[in-house]
Image: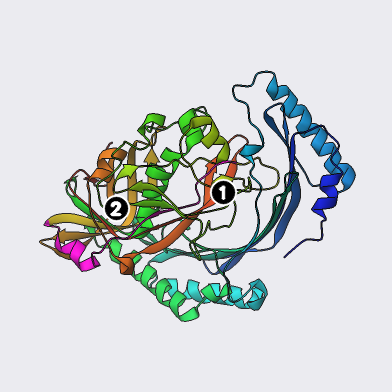
Amino acid sequence: MRTNIDLQNLLSAVDVPAQWVGLREVFEAETPRMIRDGVPVANMRYSTHGIMVEVLIDGQFGYYGTPDMTTAGIDRAAKKAFQQAQLASRSATFQFDESARPAHTGIYRSPFVKDRESLSAGKLNALLMDAYTHLKVSDKIVSATSLCQVIEIATKFISSNGSDISQDFLMLEFDLRATAADGTNQQTRSFGGMRGTCRQMGMEYFDSHEIMAQAGKIGEQALELLSADECPSGEMDVVIAPDQMMLQIHESIGHALEVDRILGDERNYAGWSFVKLEDFGKLQYGSKVMNVTFDPTVSSEFASYGFDDGGLKAEKEYLIREGILLRGLGGRESQIRSGVPGVSNFRSSGWNRAPIDRMANINLEPGDSTFDELISQVEKGVYMESNRSWSIDDYRNKFQFGCEYGKLIENGKMTATVKNPNYRGISNPFWNSLKALGNTDTFGIFGTPNCGKGEPNQVIRVGHASPACLLRRQVTVLARGSVV
């Protein structure tokens, strides 16, 4: 997947009096396939390729992306970036130097056994059609979808102070979805909730027996929900499955800890945060069983990488340990500006976007309880799976989430299925009500392909992993139609 662009030669073509120059080449190809209601509706391949030129002038960074990867094209882009940095320096609020771009060298490659070419388009389409057939367990399944997207990315980053980094990624998005209807009663079940099944791995993921078993289960659960009672309302215990914890982590931890958001950079677009700079090292974000890591080194998780887009080496760090907030999601620039310890999360969505503070793999570390032990601690509560809807305020504080599938928990046992389970809460009290965490047997790796942020907008891929979680009565469970 490597391109034949000589970046070192292009770097030498840059003719501006900059303190520092960086070139970040990105090639990305996507191959979406979808079967909807028995009909192929997506069967294509498209790609994009270009270079982002970055320069440091008078303490300010300037950026200019270009698909013209000739020496003349790169020189023109460098001059545009130079002009941007000069203009920024006239009203600068902060001065940077080369320490914001420390030199690193290295190679990263996604872990995979089988590459994209090992499964032909015809065989992949046949597998998706077979999955669709398994979703259609009844005539009451009025709509069903199976889809996958294979993503290949090759990046190379070099700089005038010695960085030389190559990274190759192979990623998969996969989804199964079935909607059952009986008159006006309509229920949907999916595989992990709204494209939550995203991984960084090869075509070995597509085990036909496992996928068909999951498709059949999803179809049967969609039917099951048609005859289920509505979820009850009230303050009660909840046990939340990893595929819903994925979005809970994303919204009430990930976005809340982005340091550029805390500094106010995103306030007019993506919002602010209830977290303040002085909270780091002090705030009891959650209960003592809560340990959250930034870990872009997890094999097969969606946002694993070796280096961020500023060239900083990726390492596992604790954001929250025993409930105490320790680190922010701030790349090298935000760390310098805020004085808050951060991580290697200076990320961009492509060659025509400048890096900003983004989530990568944000994981809730497992505990030591079996799933049955979590359930046995609940006298009255609800177990919930798979996100269906979400709402959270601009401070990433007050939230409400809807799930696809629920089970009542009564006297330590799961009993009846319930439909339309929802819950609401406030981030800090919610996480402090975390009572127990499932062990590694309950641990699930998920992700999202469409986390949006930044102006101009950047849609980026994020990974989240979590065990099943028990939360005590600070959580309000809602029936459908309840008002926040």
- Disc on res. 195: none
* Dot 2 crowding, Cα within 10 Å, few <14, some 14–19, many 20+: many
- Secondary element under disc 1, as helix, strand or loop, is strand
Q: Is residue 195 above or below residue 272?
A: below
Q: Nearer the viewer, residue 124 or 313?
A: 313
Residue 136: image x %, image y %?
43, 72
Residue 410 magenta: no
**Residue 396 located left or right of residue 383:** right
First to last magenta residue range: 356-379
Residue 273: image x %, image y %?
41, 33
- Inspect this view and state whether residue 133 appears: yes
Residue 43: image x %, image y %?
65, 65
Residue under label 2: 420
Residue 216: image x %, image y %?
39, 74
- Disc on res. 460: 1
Q: Is residue 73 above or below residue 189?
A: above
Residue 127 lies in what quarter of the image?
Answer: bottom right
* Dot 1 crowding, Cα within 10 Å, few <14, some 14–19, many 20+: some
Q: Nearer the viewer, residue 66 or 389?
A: 66
| Kind of residue indicated by mark 2 | Asn
| Kind of residue indicated by mark 1 | Ile
Location of the C terminus (image quadrant): top left
Comes first in the chain, label 1 or label 2 = 2
